[in-house]
Amino acid sequence: MIELELVAVRVELPSNTPVVVLKELAGRQRQLSIFIGNPEATAIAFALEGVDTPRPLTHDLFCDVLDELSVTLERVVITELRDTTYFADLHLKASAGVVHVSSRPSDAIALAVRTGCPIFAEEDVLDEAGFVEEVDEDVDAEEVVEEFRQFIDNVSPDDFAS
């Protein structure tokens, strides 16, 4: 397994599809881009920005349940890429030992951001889908940040108040 860091949640243009970008912490610095849904992108972005919602989002609720049950999320692992679908596992530690639970990568990452647990990928996944980003000197980092802010501005915590 290879440890990754969450680099960004951004919107791919022109399709306006959210994507989460993960990067290898050591080694070749490969990146992994995973297309995700709008709700999961919002959940990850809110956690990264420290946005408080009037009521708990699903991922916040899940973390609360884990706490109440004295279960710790030790790590999330991107386990497989089958066709164009990524798979992940939650590694949960309870008094009885460690349990692996299947998860969508987007949900696993949303939980990892909230709990501070590490994110990993199987080497086969990075070998198949990882890439080394070429630096484009014409891309302005402020433009990327502004694009992300516009995405966040279009989502309100009130959207989750029901």
Image (spheres, grey):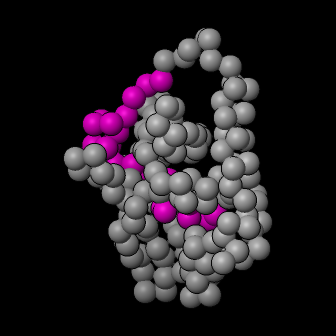
State which region is magenta.
107-133
Q: In this view, does 78 lie to the left or right of 151?
A: left
Residue 135 or 118: which is nearer the viewer?
Answer: 135
Q: Residue reaching furthest top?
A: 137
Image location (x, y in percent) of residue 137 = 61, 11
| Residue 105 visible (yes or no) | yes
Q: Is 113 part of what is drawn in magenta?
A: yes
Name the residue: 48% across, 23% down: 133
Left of 59 or right of it: where is 141? right
> Residue 126: where, in percent of width, then height?
35, 39
> Can you see residue 113?
no
* Residue 99 belongs to the span the image colors magenta: no
Q: Could you tell me residue 70's position as x and y percent?
A: 58, 85
Q: Residue sitting at 51 percent across and 66 percent down?
A: 74
Residue under the point 66% across and 78% down = 162
Q: Position of residue 114 (x, y in %)?
A: 64, 63
Q: In this view, does 24 lie to the left or right of 82?
A: right
Depicted 5 relative to depicted 67: above or below = above
Number of marks in picture: 0
User: What residue is rendered at 37% in x and 34% in y?
Assistant: 130
Q: Nearer the viewer, residue 102 or 91?
A: 102
